[in-house]
Structures are given as C-alpha cells and as structure tokens.
Image (spheres, rainbow, N blue to C red):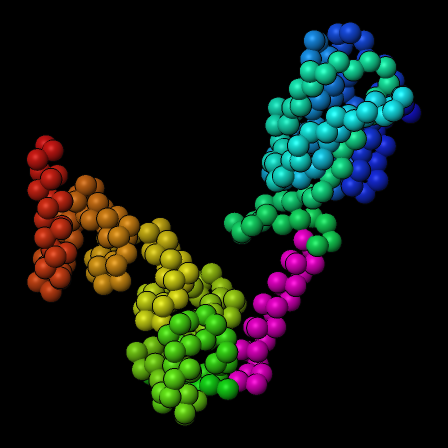
C-alpha cells in the first residue's frame, strides 16, 4: 500500500494532495492519480522558492495524444484561517512533460498545506485536424451529435428522403434538397431566392458534369465523400467548387492536386491552376517542369501545350526558364 504522504485524493475532476511537512530543502513527487484518461503526478520542490508542477505520467497515450488541460490550482494552508494562494486560471494548456506547467511560489509556506487542482476541462486533439474535443460528456455529446447529423444527411441523400430539387446532368438525374444546397453555396442560394427557372421548375441543369461526378459533388456537400471517390473526381469537383463558390471544396482540391504531380499530369494541372487561379499549384508545376528538368522529358507534349496555352501563362513559364539558365 502506498504511503499516505504521497497519495492524492480525487473525485471526477478534483485532486487534492495533503502535505504535512516539507523540509527546508527537499523534493517530493506524488503517487500517480487518475483524472480523465490519464494518470497524473504533482510534485513540489523547495529551495528558497517553492516549485509546484502538474504533469501527466509518461505513456504511449501521453506521447500520441497529450491532454489539453484547463484547470485552477491552489495552495491552501491547512491550519489557522486556511489562507490560499491561487494561480491564474490555466486554459487549453497542452501538457506532455514536467516542464510544461511550473508554478513558482515565492511566499514562504510552513506547516501543513494542500495542493488543490480543479480540472475545468480536458481535451484531446482531433485526429482529423479539427478543433480539440473535450473528453467529458459535453465534448462526447457534441462528437456524437456531429456524427449522427452527418449520418442523417447521408441518408437523406442516398435514400432520397423528402428531396425537393432535381439535378439533371449529362447522363442522368439525382434528387437533392434545396435548403442544404443553399446553405453550402451562395450560388445555389441565389438561384432559389430569386425568380429564376431553377426555383420555378425545381430543377438544376448541370450539363457539364457526369452523374458519377455529380454524386461525388453531392456526397461532399452532404459530408459523405470517400477518399477514393474524391481522388477519382478531383478535377470535376474543382470545376464545380469554382462554379458554385464552395471555397472549402476548392481548397481541398487544390491541396490534393499538389500532392501527386508527375509527367503525365503536370500540363493538365498547370492549365487548371491558371484557369481556377490556384497560385501554389501553378508555382509547383512550373518548378517541376523547369527546376527539375521535366520539361525535356515531355518535350513534344510541352510544345503542343504552348500552342494553346494562355499567353500570360506561357510568358510566366519562359521567365522561369530564363531565370534557370541565368543560374548556370
């Protein structure tokens, strides 16, 4: 059984460590105590100044998913009138090591005292790169709510639940919901808000899109697109994102197209970068062609490209070529 001098008493969000005596120059570390998903330690070190530390126990969980803590920490003298020293509230502090939170207390403390930590929230980073999410009921409720809402939206699309608009594409039709389209695209919102034919006939004609690409487009809007589906239809999705002013989809396509430039697609990517005003993609394609010399590997295709490419784009490429020659 652990020595009571090192034991920390806990409830679901509160930890208290009672210290009966601390010598004039000493160090003490608590036993591990569980709050949330993690085991924690408190430590004190007294040498002219009292240093109080709070940190999670080193583990694979801590390394891979460290806690992001919000808490109030106090030192309370446990005799007399129970005077308390309170550190300013800590908010969303990532704690991985014993150096991430250190409280230096210069006020001399003698006799018995209590270190009191009240955890206001504990969060973990989202695996998808989103906002950190609380591990406690509020955060879990939000996470479940978001997942349920997305699943319901997906069902509305795949099962055609109360669709009220028909999208006609080059080789078929798909039912959708004008409220969802309007919420995701200012162009769709304008269509349905004014006396346009789309509002009157409850149809949208997208003749430049196949039914497979349109399905991928709607799956993205409804939060249900798969990775392979996205990769397959990136260029069609980019066109739709630009046409219907869906900036997050355009950004996603831009990022994805940057990842796998090669000699087979670089000229098409360059053309699309110019057409849809994607500066980083354009710079990356020109750099790939010129700095890495791939322009010589596809000489015939590149010469054909120059005959039909935008003049400003051709001028930009040749400026880069001239700059490269001057560097030799």
Where the N terminus falls, by quadrant? top right
Which is nearer the eye, 258 or 49? 49
Q: Residue at x 78, y 41 (%)?
A: 13
Which is nearer the eye, 180 or 144? 180
Residue 315 at x, y = what percent?
9, 53
Q: Is residue 285 magenta?
A: no
Instruction: Provide the major secondary structure of the magenta segment.
Output: helix
Q: Is residue 83 above or below residue 163?
A: above
Residue farthest to the front?
81
Res 264 seen here: no
User: Number of numbered discs present?
Assistant: 0
Res 247 seen here: yes
Q: Is residue 225 above or below residue 179?
A: above
Q: In the picture, residue 72 is in which quadrant?
A: top right
Where the C terminus falls, by quadrant? top left
Horizontally, residue 205 falls left or right of residue 71, namely: left
Residue 42 at x, y = what percent?
75, 25
Q: Residue at x 23, y 48 (%)?
A: 283
Q: Which residues are magenta?
A: 139-163
Residue 203 at x, y = what percent?
41, 88
Residue farthest to the top?
24
Q: Residue at x 57, y 73 (%)?
A: 153
Q: In the picture, residue 321 is in which quadrant?
A: top left
Which is nearer the eye, 100 or 126? 100
Q: Is residue 150 magenta?
A: yes
Q: In the picture, residue 75 is in which quadrant?
A: top right
Residue 131 at x, y = what percent?
56, 50
Which is nearer the eye, 168 or 195? 195
Residue farthest to the bottom?
201
Q: Is residue 173 above or below residue 187?
A: below
């Amino acid at each position: 059984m652990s020595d009571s001098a090192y034991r920390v008493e806990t409830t679901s969000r509160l930890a208290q460590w009672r210290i009966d005596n601390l010598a004039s120059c000493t160090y003490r570390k608590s036993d591990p105590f569980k709050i949330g998903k993690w085991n924690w330690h408190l430590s004190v070190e007294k040498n002219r100044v009292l240093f109080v530390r709070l940190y999670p126990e080193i583990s694979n969980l801590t390394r891979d998913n460290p806690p992001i803590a919000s808490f109030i920490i106090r030192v309370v003298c446990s005799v007399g009138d129970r005077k308390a020293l309170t550190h300013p509230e800590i908010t969303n502090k990532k704690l991985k090591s014993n150096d991430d939170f250190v409280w230096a207390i210069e006020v001399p403390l003698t006799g018995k005292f209590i270190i009191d930590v009240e955890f206001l929230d504990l969060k973990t980073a989202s695996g998808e790169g989103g906002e950190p999410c609380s591990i406690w009921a509020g955060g879990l409720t939000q996470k479940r709510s978001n997942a349920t809402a997305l699943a319901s939206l997906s069902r509305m699309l795949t099962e055609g639940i109360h669709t009220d608009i028909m999208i006609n594409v080059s080789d078929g039709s798909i039912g959708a919901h004008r409220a969802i389209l309007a919420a995701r695209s200012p162009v769709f919102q304008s269509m349905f808000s004014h006396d346009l034919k789309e509002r009157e006939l409850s149809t949208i004609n997208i003749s430049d899109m196949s039914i497979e690409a349109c399905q991928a487009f709607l799956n993205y809007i409804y939060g249900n697109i798969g990775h392979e589906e996205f990769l397959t239809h990136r260029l069609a999705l980019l066109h739709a994102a630009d046409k219907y002013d869906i900036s997050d989809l355009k950004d996603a396509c831009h990022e994805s197209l940057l990842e796998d430039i090669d000699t087979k697609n670089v000229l098409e990517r360059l053309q699309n970068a110019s057409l849809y005003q994607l500066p980083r993609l354009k710079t990356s394609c020109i750099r790939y062609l010129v700095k890495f010399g791939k322009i010589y590997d596809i000489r015939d295709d590149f010469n054909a490209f120059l005959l039909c490419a935008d003049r400003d784009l051709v001028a930009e490429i040749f400026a880069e070529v001239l700059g490269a020659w001057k560097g030799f």
